[in-house]
Every structure is written in structure tokens, then in C-alpha cells.
Image: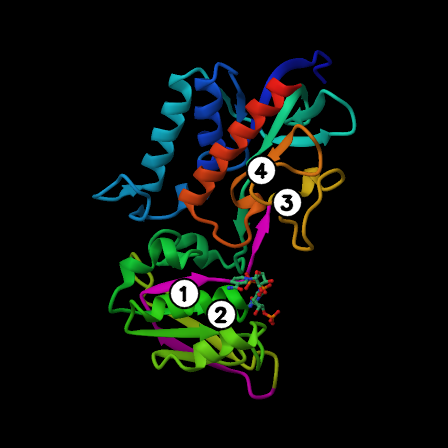
């Protein structure tokens, strides 16, 4: 155990668009933030295909390339970027104490939480196998690549309905794979799905696996799994979208920071301020609604400005 604590002015946890944008603003304000990249350096965008909806890239850009640009830009102005995961926090004392990799303790005057959210997956080996070549957890990001094709959305909540409706506007046919005989989604979303001609709901279906040569060409499903009527069904699809929920990465702050029942950090509306003064949140960890790269970047800018003002006032 390294007993020597390091003292910093601003610590940013997370390296998606929110964390890096906060870092760019703070380093340009000469606050020299220290940023820890976390479990998935570059965040969720590094596992999508091309990004075509981030303003400023008329030809699109790969998620990996965009995150490399953001990192380089933050470094250019003096952000100290380090590999490492925040494993423990103590926000009951000031300066706040954050443990990195169960080892080093950072004492910080201000903290920006930009730890993102993680899309839930079913846990099938085929999801990993076809990641980025037919498997996606974001219809808004990747739907465009499946124009005119057949796709499937797994899930029966509001997100699944929203994604299915969005995809129905682009694709030839959208299957919704729903494990029960009813949707969890709100009535209004259910009605919209039912009114959309090219969405077919596969009730009481679960996913066994995916198949395809080099990319997804179909899914193998169980109908009425674990009942006497169980049967195996194949559907031909080019895209397989997960919409079974997201988990905001807020667990290590839960003791101190207010969240909604799912775990999204609550911020004071119109700001990035949390219930603890000096602790700010931005990006998907506090956004159950939009969850886009550009909104995450925008909220990272807000967190940087809120932090700078708070430090100045203090
Ligand atoms: P939800 O938790 O509401 O729904 C998840 C869905 O995925 C459920 O249908 C669930 O099935 C299904 N599911 C979960 N795990 C599995 C699994 N292992 N296999 C198969 N199916 C599975 O998540 P959402 O992301 O849809 O929504 C989260 C919150 O955000 C909700 O409060 C929602 O209302 C809100 N939201 C609101 C929107 C809006 O108002 N426009 C848009 C998007 C989200 P089951 O029902 O059987 O549990």
C-alpha cells in the first residue's frame, strides 16, 4: 500500500467525451486537471463503429479515432492523463479522497465524475464475437449502417421501443425479441410500436446465439423456453441491437452522492452540481435521457465551468 497521498486541485474520473471535454476546458483555464481513464479508456464510443452524428466530422470518424483526438487535445493543454481505475471514494472529508487501483490515494479539491454508463448485454459469447460487426447497443449510433436491412432489438422497455421505432424508419424490418408475453414499456410507447407496420414482436422469445460469416447474418432464438412448447426459431438479420437497459457507473459514489433508483447521479437541473459541494457529474452517469456523445461533451463543458467557478468562489 502506497501511504503517500498525492494532492491535486481537480480530479476527473472517466475518459469518454464528458471527461475529456471537462479536461480540455480546465486545462485551458490553467487548472491542470488529473484524469484517470477508468476501466474502458475512451469510453463506450471505442466499441461502436463509425460516428456520423458528432458535429464537425462530415465524413464520419471511428469512435477510437475521435477519442484519440479528444485525448490529444486534452494533453496539449496540460491535462495529466493516467491509466487507472477509481476503486474507492471518501467524500465525507475535505479534500475528497479517491483511491486509485486499491493503492494510491488522491486528495482533490474538486471532483468531476464522468464514469459513464455501461449497456447491459445478455452475456452470450456471440455478442463479443460480433461486437462492431452486427452487434450494437445503440440504435442512434449504428442504425444508419442497416438501412434497408432486417434487424432485431432485444428488450421490451421504453428504450427497446424507442430504438425499434427509430430503426423502423431506416430498416426494412425490425423484430423485437421480448422474453415475456407483454412489454414493460409505457402505454404510449407500446401504442407507437403497434402502429408501426414493419415492427414484428416475437413474444416469449429469448436469444440462444447468433450466426454469420464475418458478421451477423441471423439469430437463433428459443420460443417459450423451458416449457413443454419450447422450440428453436431462426431469424435472418444483419443487425442485432441490445436494449435491455444501461447501468450507470456510480456504485463507488453511492454512499455519498444522490442517485435515482437506477443509479443515475442526480444533478441540480441546469448544472453539473451534485448534492455535495465541489463534486460535479457529467456525461452518461447522470443522463438517463439523451446518452449521446455530443450531449456528454456538452455536459463535460458545464462541469468544467461549474468547477472553475466553484474553486474561484472558494
Ligand atoms: P427497462 O429496465 O425499463 O427495460 C428493460 C427491458 O429489457 C425489459 O423489457 C426487460 O424484460 C428486458 N430485459 C432485461 N434483461 C433481459 C434479458 N436478460 N433478456 C431479455 N430481456 C431482458 O430499461 P430501459 O432501458 O428500457 O428503460 C430504463 C428507464 O428509462 C425506464 O424507467 C424507462 O421508462 C426510461 N426511459 C424512458 C424513455 C422515454 O420516456 N422516452 C426512453 C427510454 C427509457 P422484462 O420486462 O421481462 O423484465
Asked whether mark 3 lies closer than 8 Å to ligand 1, one says no
User: Start and end of the magenta stretch?
Assistant: 228-248
**Principal SS element in the magenta part?**
strand
Residue 43 visible in the snapshot: no
Q: Which mark is residue 207?
A: 2
Q: State which quadrant residue 21 falls in.
A: top left
Q: Nearer the viewer, residue 29 or 139?
A: 29
Label 4 – label 3 distance at C-alpha: 10 Å
Mark 2 vs mark 4: which is more N-terminal?
2
Residue under the image location 33 percent in, 48 percent down: 49
Q: Quote the CA–CA distance across marks 2 and 1.
A: 8 Å
Q: Which residue is mark 3?
A: 265
Residue at 69 percent across and 30 percent down: it is 277
Q: Which residue is mark 1?
A: 210
Q: Residue at x 48, y 80 (%)?
A: 191
Q: Are dots 2 and 1 in contact, CB under 8 Å?
A: yes
Q: N-terminal of the two: label 4 or label 3?
A: 3
Residue 243 sits inside the magenta stretch: yes
Picture layout, residue 63 above or below residue 164: above
Residue 242 in picture, x, y percent from top left: 47, 61
C-alpha distance separating marks 1 and 4: 41 Å
Marked residue nearer the N-terminal end (1 or 4): 1
Check contact, mark 4 vs mark 3: CB within 8 A.
no
SS for callout 2: strand
**Marks 2/4: CA–CA distance:** 39 Å
The reply to whether the residue tagged 2 has its Cβ within 8 angstroms of ligand 1 is yes
Q: Residues within 10 Å of mark 4 (few under 14, many from 20)?
A: many
The answer to which of marks 3 and 2 sits earlier in the sequence is: 2
Say left or right for 84 vs 176.
right
Q: Secondary structure at mark 4?
A: loop
The mark nearer the N terminus, 3 or 1, is 1
Say which residue label 4 marks: 272
Amino acid at each position: 500500500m502506497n501511504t503517500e497521498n498525492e494532492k491535486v486541485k481537480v480530479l476527473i474520473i472517466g475518459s469518454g467525451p464528458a471527461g475529456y471535454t471537462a479536461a480540455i476546458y480546465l486545462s485551458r483555464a490553467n487548472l491542470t486537471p488529473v484524469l484517470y481513464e477508468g476501466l474502458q479508456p475512451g469510453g463506450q464510443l471505442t466499441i461502436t463503429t463509425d460516428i456520423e452524428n458528432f458535429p464537425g466530422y462530415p465524413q464520419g470518424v471511428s469512435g477510437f479515432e475521435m477519442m484519440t483526438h479528444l485525448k490529444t487535445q486534452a494533453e496539449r493543454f496540460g491535462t495529466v492523463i493516467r491509466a487507472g481505475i477509481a476503486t474507492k471514494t471518501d467524500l465525507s472529508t475535505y479534500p475528497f479522497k479517491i483511491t486509485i487501483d486499491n493503492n494510491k490515494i488522491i486528495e482533490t479539491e474538486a471532483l468531476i465524475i464522468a464514469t459513464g454508463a455501461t449497456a447491459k448485454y445478455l452475456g452470450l459469447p456471440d455478442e463479443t464475437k460480433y461486437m462492431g460487426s452486427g452487434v450494437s447497443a445503440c440504435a442512434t449510433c449504428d442504425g444508419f449502417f442497416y438501412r434497408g436491412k432486417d434487424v432485431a432489438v432485444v428488450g421490451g422497455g421504453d428504450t427497446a421501443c424507442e430504438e425499434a421505432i427509430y430503426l423502423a424508419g431506416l430498416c426494412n424490418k425490425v423484430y423485437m425479441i421480448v422474453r415475456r408475453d407483454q412489454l414493460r414499456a409505457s402505454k404510449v410507447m407500446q401504442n407507437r410500436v403497434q402502429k408501426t407496420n414493419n415492427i414484428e414482436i416475437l413474444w416469449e422469445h429469448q436469444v440462444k446465439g447468433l450466426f454469420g460469416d464475418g458478421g451477423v447474418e441471423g439469430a437463433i432464438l428459443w420460443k417459450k423456453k423451458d416449457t413443454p412448447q419450447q422450440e428453436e426459431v431462426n431469424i435472418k438479420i444483419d443487425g442485432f441491437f441490445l436494449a435491455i437497459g444501461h447501468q450507470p457507473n456510480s456504485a463507488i459514489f453511492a454512499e455519498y452522492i444522490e442517485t435515482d433508483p437506477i443509479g443515475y447521479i442526480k444533478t441540480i437541473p441546469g448544472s453539473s452540481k451534485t448534492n455535495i459541494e465541489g463534486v460535479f457529474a457529467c456525461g452518461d452517469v447522470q443522463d438517463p435521457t439523451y446518452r449521446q456523445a455530443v450531449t456528454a461533451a456538452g455536459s463535460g463543458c458545464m462541469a468544467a465551468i461549474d468547477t472553475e467557478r466553484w474553486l474561484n468562489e472558494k
